[in-house]
Image (tube, helix red, strand yellow):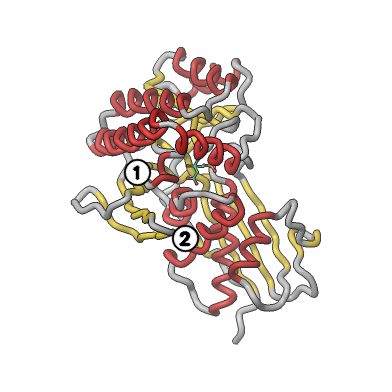
Amino acid sequence: MELLEAHASAPGKVILFGEHAVVYGEPSLSLAVARRTRVSGETVGSQFTVNGFPLNPEFHAYIERAIRLHWDAVPLRLQTESEIPSGSGIGSSAALSVAINAVLLRLKRQAMPPVADVASAAFETEFATQGAASPNDTTVSTAGGGVLMSPRRLEGAEVEFLWRIQRGEREWNAHRVRIPRLPLVVGNTGMKGKTSEQVAKVRRFVEHSAFARDAIRDIGRLTLQGAEALRVGDLRRVGDLMNRNHGLLHTLGVDTPRLEQLVEAARKAPGTLGAKLTGAGGGGCMIALTEQPEECRRRLEQAGAMAFSVEASPEGLRFEQER
Ligand code: PMV
């Protein structure tokens, strides 16, 4: 019997180390978080609709792009629902790209698509929509848990190779890494940073400055040190490396005065081990690693942020029940 509807959900993420540098093939380390975006699709429409409205590239850029790239059949009636604040570096666009492509591939193939195919389709969607991107966010959202991206395939008992994604001369190898329970608090500036603009800004800097290229390489090195510190459970060192990563992101010009205030407020809170901006910057969110999450959250709120603790999500892409 032909399958007429599909439902999928995918989590958001926080980048612990390596944003921006991962666009240039350097390592990054991220963690999926327990806030999800859900997409349902039915092949019953006479025109494409999203939440009851006609599909509009202005408001539904990622969905429209996914359809253009990965769908060639009848119009779909789509519903979306998200627990992830948009445009804030917590991976809302990646989660949406994963969930919509999962629905499209499920309906198109009439069979469960391999997760690596969904990850790849979601990356293409993000890349085409943003003009530049690494497969980091879409990979983490597909795989769930802790994910280490690396320009080379890593061997060893502490990493499990997931899949490889290539584009042009670059390749990113995705690995599952076990991450200890991390008490993380997110502070949201409430200002939306546009990922494409921040990525373009860093690109201009990298093209013209050896100083910026050094910062990118330093972030890559520090990410691998962070992965090792996490593996041995040395959270003090993890915090210290987060502080250093933030300094390098500041150098790259993606920090803002508001993010800086929140990072400072978090660092002053008792129990904080480290704090940095997370995601593309230019607004959006910062994260703090802390032994006292409640206190850190309170301080961030006092500093004017919307703040919340995040739980890791071991689960990535999930196909929801088909009725
Ligand atoms: O702000 P977000 O969640 O879209 O994160 C972007 C991460 C970057 O490294 C800046 C870009 C990318 O595609 O990897």
- Tell me the crowding category of disc 2: few under 14, some 14 to 19, or many 20 or more residues within 10 angstroms, Cα based: many
Q: Nearest the camera: 262 or 321?
A: 262
Name the image quarter holding residue 77. Answer: bottom right
Q: Quadrant of the image for the N terminus?
A: bottom right
Label 2 element class: helix
Residue drawn at 63 percent across, 19 percent down: 304
* Residue to which mark 1 is pinned: 27
Of mark 1 and mark 2, the one earlier in the sequence is: 1
Count of numbered marks:
2
Q: CA distance from mark 1 to mark 2?
A: 18 Å
In-image side of 84 versus 26 (left or right): right
Ligand 1 lies under 8 Å from the Cβ of mark 2: no
In-image side of 150 versus 260 (left or right): left
The residue lying furthest to the bottom in this view is 1
Residue drawn at 61 percent across, 79 percent down: 3
Residue 275 percent location from the top left of the image: 44, 24
